[in-house]
Structure formats: C-alpha cells, structure tokens
Image (tube, grey):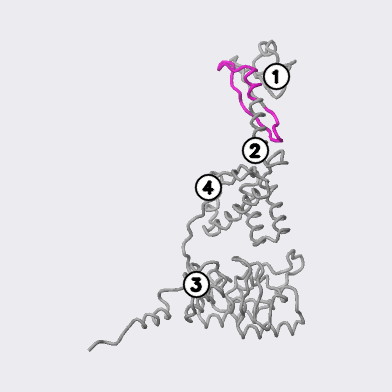
Amino acid sequence: MALRFAKLSRTAVRSMPAGAKITEHGITAERLANGDVAYSVNIMVDGERIHRTAGRESEGVTREQAERMIETLRTRAREERLNLPKGRKTSQSFADAAPLYVERLEREGGKGIPRKRQHITTSLIPAFGNCRLDGISETLIKTFIQSRRRAKAKDSTINRELATLSHLLRCAARWKWIGRDKIPTIDRLREGAGRIIALSPDQCAALLHGAVEDQDPDLWLFIMICLQTSMRHGEARRLRWEHYDAHRRRFYIPEAKAGEREQPVPTQLAEALEAVMEDRRVSSGYVFAGGPGSKTGYRHTFRKAFARAADRAGLDPAIITPHVMRHTAITKLVKAGIDLPTVQRVSGHKTLAMVLRYTHIDGPHIDSAVNHLGFAAVG
C-alpha cells in the first residue's frame, strides 16, 4: 500500500523556509540555506537503526526516491532474513552468541573450554562484540590481527585466539545459527620456532630448594610435578587426586591441549605424591585447590610464588617462567637419548614436529651420536 503523507506533501516542501525540516514516515526533507532541499531516511529495520542520505532536489531526488530507498532497504533485510537458518528472525551479534557457544560446549563436553572462554572474554568480544555473527569478514579478521600485534601479542597467541574464533563459527554453522557460507577463511600466522630455555640439574635443584623455603605450601609439589613429568603448568594446576593411579603411577588428564591422555610419573615423584595423600588424608578433589571465591575449584596461578622461588635460586623471573620447567623436562629426555615418539607420548605433544624443536644441534647427545658414524682407519 502506498504511503499517504499529511505533513510531507509537495506543497509543504515547496513552501518551507531555509533551515526548516519536515519528517514523516521516516523521510526528512530539509530546506538548505542555498534554497536546495535535502532528503534523508531514518528507519528501524530488523531492530537496527538505518540512517541514509537520499540526495538533493538539485540532483533530481524527490520524496518518491526516498520512499523507494526505504523499500529497497526493507527488501534487502527480508532477503537476508530468508537466508538465515530456520527459526531465526534476526542474526545474533557475536557478543550474544559467544556465551551461548561456551554454555553449549560445556553441555556437550567440549575440550579446552577455559582457554576458549579466556580468548573470547579478553580478545574476541572486544574486537567483534558488536558485529553480526554472520557478518564477520576476512577484512575484520585482518584488522583484528593488526590490532593484536599493535598490543604486542605474539603470533602464537593470536593463532590460538583465531582458532577459537574459527571453532565458534564452525559450531554456529553446525547448530544452524548461521549458514555455512558465512564462515570466513581464517588463515593462521607463521610462527617461529621460538627460543627454548632449559635449566641445568643444579638450577633445578636450586629452584626446588627455593620452593621448599617459600610460604606457599603447594609450590614445591607444583614445581616437582612440572620438572618430573613435562606437564604444562595449566595441566598440573588442574590435576585431581582421584585421577592418580598409584599402582600404575599414572595421572589421567581428561582435558589436555592435544586431547585426553595418561601422564606417567617417575618413582621419586610417585613417592612424594603418596606421602602428601597420606599426610593430608585425601583421595579426591584438586591437588592444588583454589582459595575462597574460586569458581573452578583449582588454583589459577602459581606465577608470583614461582617468581619468588626463581629469585631465591638466583634465576631471573622475567626469563625463567613456569613453562621453562616443561622445556627442561623434555630437553632432559631428548639428551638422555630417548626416542622421539616416546618423548612425544610423555610430553603430550600433538605432533612429532613439535618435539623436534628440542633436538638442540649443540647438545652433548648430538656429539655422542655422530661418534657412531666413525670407523677404523684402513691400513
């Protein structure tokens, strides 16, 4: 049905003085100082405010062109709505969809949820929160990467955040929140091998001694676990007593970076664990329980306590971080001549290529290996 205009009639527009405006049905006509008339539209379409300039009377624009513009905008919205998954009238924003994604992953038993939640909260919602879920483009993703690099984020960190974004969009398509054709291509950044720092046996002993002297009663066990298993420090913080098999000397890790796995435990550490269990009279719950107010039940960090122990050991806490303990344990296995597939099983790496980074070319084990290539002199 054609619109009827009571205020914005042709007669009213012609008689407007300079500076006057008439608005009706989302169309505004304004008489400019030079006598020209400017037309604009301001309407709500699918819950979104759209404000556009239609043009000027001197350019041949009339009220009819503004009416056609409104109809075009509404038609385009209807077409987009038809392309939405069945049952949805408007597209979700990223900020609305992200919490629902985490909630559904939790119900379905998804992996890496704490890490995904962190990426979403700290990086992805600030960048994409106001965007439509089906409107995240490759251009927006490139802008996000540039912004994160300006914030001094490492390429490896950005890649993990992009992986979470990619998984969220793929799940959204699988759950019929968006169409599969709305998933943009998300290329990963090239990551360098990075510098691997490993502690010497004397430094390990000094670090453990510094932990024993610390006021934090859990620190020495945390350091001992990381140094003697090569676990990631996040995995160590989430260990549970009921997941420890004392007979087989194995920790079951249900949520690891490369999927669930069993972590073998050396004899010395097994004896320490069993002594702690007996002393504390525990058989279940988190090994490193969180304090009052902890939402997860386990400790979220040992960083400050670890830095104190590193300082006591004469190490630089800015360089020697908890992750260095993992590097140290894996490097020790490689130097001992353990075959790389076995090292991979112990360390929990997803690929053998990641383990190859620890085969330092200047290590004594390399010198020992090449000596096998020699042969007795002839004659």
- Relative vertical location of residue 203 with respect to residue 136 in this rendering, above or below: below
On the image, numbered disc 3 is attached to which residue?
Answer: 197
- The residue at 59%/52% (across/down) is 166
Nearest the viewer among 7 and 333 is 333
User: Which percent across, then down, holds residue 323?
Assistant: 57, 70
Question: Tags 3 and 2 in contact by the CB under 8 Å rule?
Answer: no
Separation of residues labelled 4 and 2 (CA atoms): 26 Å
On the image, numbered disc 2 is attached to which residue?
Answer: 83
Separation of residues labelled 4 and 3 (CA atoms): 32 Å
Quadrant of residue 274 within the rendered picture:
bottom right
Q: Look at the image and give the residue range highlighted in magenta.
A: 42-69
Disc 1 crowd rating (10 Å Cα; few below 14, some 14-19, many 20+) is: some
The three-letter amino acid code for the residue at tag 4 is Lys
Relative side of 216 to 330, left or right: right
Circle nearer the viewer, 4 or 3: 4
Q: Earlier in the sequence, mark 3 or mark 1?
A: 1
Circle 1 sits in a helix, a strand or a loop, which is it? strand
Circle 3 sits in a helix, a strand or a loop, which is it? loop
The three-letter amino acid code for the residue at tag 3 is Ile
Q: Is residue 95 visible?
A: yes
Q: Earlier in the sequence, mark 1 or mark 2?
A: 1
On the image, numbered disc 1 is attached to which residue?
Answer: 22
Which disc number belongs to residue 208? none
User: Which percent across, then down, holds residue 129?
Assistant: 65, 46
- Relative vertical location of residue 182 with respect to residue 271 in this rendering, above or below: above
Q: Is residue 303 visible?
A: no
Separation of residues labelled 3 and 1 (CA atoms): 72 Å
User: Which percent across, then down, holds residue 243?
Assistant: 70, 75
Q: Quadrant of the C terminus?
A: bottom left
